[in-house]
């Protein structure tokens, strides 16, 4: 069981890294610095919850899927979702798990502190 959880974590980390690589190739459409901080926060959350309860792992997995499964306006009728929406979901996940140190702010790339600005929950 333990090996399976670690494998699942590594698969999700690879998905985050793959999505970040895709964003790097999309010229000028995304705030790459913000995307990199969001990806780093997700990696930390994934590793921190590898052996956590199923509900916490599911919450982090949902945040990963929200970040990775972006809509692309070229292939979908829905508008492209902003990184700010991803940031809100990831920050709410970190806050819920008691990891305020992993909250990503838009203006300070090296600090992960401060309150979550959203009163709405995605989950």
Image (tube, helix red, strand yellow):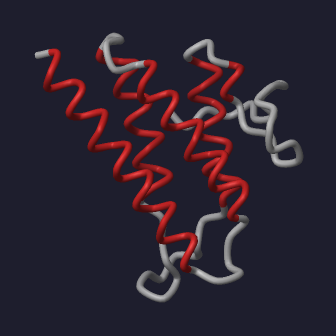
What residue is drawn where x is 82% and y is 48%?
Answer: 106
Residue sitting nearer the eye, 119 or 116: 116
Residue at horizontal 60%, vertical 65%?
81
Q: Give the position of the N terminus as an image quadrant.
A: top left
Considering every residue shown, the one lying at the far left of the view is 1
Query: Can you say whether 18 is above or below 77 in the image?
Result: above
> Can you give x and y, in whole percent of width and height, for residue 40 in the image?
58, 41
User: Which residue of the protein is positioned furthest toward the right in this rendering?
Assistant: 107
In this view, the residue in front, 85 or 15, is 15
Q: Quadrant of residue 10?
A: top left
- Image point (80%, 38%), residue name: 110
**Residue 79 image offset from top left, x and y in percent:** 58, 76
Q: Is residue 104 left or right of residue 13?
A: right
x, y percent for residue 116: 77, 29
Residue at x 24%, y 26% (from the top left corner):
6
Q: Farthest bottom residue? A: 74
Q: How many marks?
A: 0
Give the vertical position of 51 relative to 58 (above or below).
above
Asked where in the image residue 7 lies, by quadrant, the reply is top left
Q: Nearer the viewer, residue 99 or 77?
A: 99
Q: Nearer the viewer, residue 33 or 59?
A: 33
When the figure is inspected, residue 21 is found, relative to residue 4, above or below; the finding is below
In this rendering, would 67 be left or right of 50?
right
Picture coordinates of residue 45 (x, y %)?
50, 27
């Amino acid at each position: 069981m333990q090996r399976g959880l670690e494998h699942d974590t590594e698969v999700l980390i690879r998905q985050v890294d793959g999505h970040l690589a895709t964003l790097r190739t999309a010229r000028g459409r995304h705030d790459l610095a913000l995307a990199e901080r969001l990806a780093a926060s997700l990696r930390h959350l994934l590793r921190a919850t590898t052996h956590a309860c199923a509900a916490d792992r599911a919450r982090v997995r949902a945040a990963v899927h929200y970040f990775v499964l972006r809509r692309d306006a070229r292939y979908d009728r829905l508008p492209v979702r902003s990184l700010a929406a991803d940031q809100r979901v990831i920050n709410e996940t970190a806050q819920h798990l008691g990891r305020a140190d992993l909250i990503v702010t838009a203006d300070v790339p090296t600090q992960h502190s401060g309150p979550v600005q959203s009163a709405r929950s995605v989950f």
